[in-house]
Amino acid sequence: MKKLIVLSAIAALTSGAALAQSINLTGNVDSICNVSTIGSSSASFAELEVGTPDVNIGVEIQCNDPDGATVSLITSEGHLQNADQEDKGVGYWATLDAAPFNFTLKADDGQNDKPNSQTILKTETAKVAALANGVSGNITLSLKETALFSGTYADTLAFVITVGN
């Protein structure tokens, strides 16, 4: 009799009499991909001559996209341009040092909209993870020439991030 009860129970369990319900689980993490300066977003050299102390601007970078990102520095004028004579300029270099990013834009030839950038690829998993958590560092501005002419000199340095592919 016990064999019959056990066999009946097994038959009932394997015959499809048991019911199942699927539970779908979902979640979402908002995309964050930005760069910012810490403190001021402007810089001024005490003197426009080689040997003037470098100017440092604190920066923060974060991008939680798993495809990585590209960070760029772009000079609008290609040097510190004289307001009276645009061909008269003072060369400078802008170096971004915010690990894993480290590169230099040489703004010393007057080429408008001149970029330099570095890309962190999705295959560089440790760097992508660091970028997702956020990194900080500096943009260091160094004069490479001395101004010969009087006047106001200016440039706009763009600090840009784009999501990887």
Image (spheres, rainbow, N blue to C red):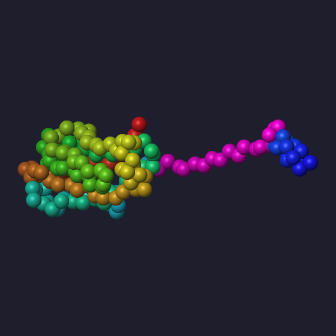
In the image, is 17 to the left or to the right of 115? right
Instruction: Please say if 137 is above or below 65.
Output: below
Quadrant of the frame with the C terminus: top left
Q: Is residue 70 magenta?
A: no
Main secondary structure along the magenta-highlighted residues: loop
Residue 100 picture location, percent across and down: 31, 52
* Residue drawn at point x = 10 percent, y = 56 percent: 49
Above or below residue 88? Residue 151 is below
Q: Residue furthest right?
A: 1
Q: Tell me the magenta residue range.
A: 14-32
In this orientation, which residue lies closer to the viewer: 24 or 51?
24
Q: Is residue 118 left or right of residue 148?
A: right
User: Which x, y percent locates residue 138?
Assistant: 28, 58
User: At 39% from the left edge and 47% from the top edge, which residue is drawn?
Assistant: 125
- At 29% from the left and 44% from the top, the residue drawn is 118
**Residue at point 30% right, 55% down?**
98
Of residues 105 and 70, the one nearer the viewer is: 70
- Residue 163 at least partly seen: no
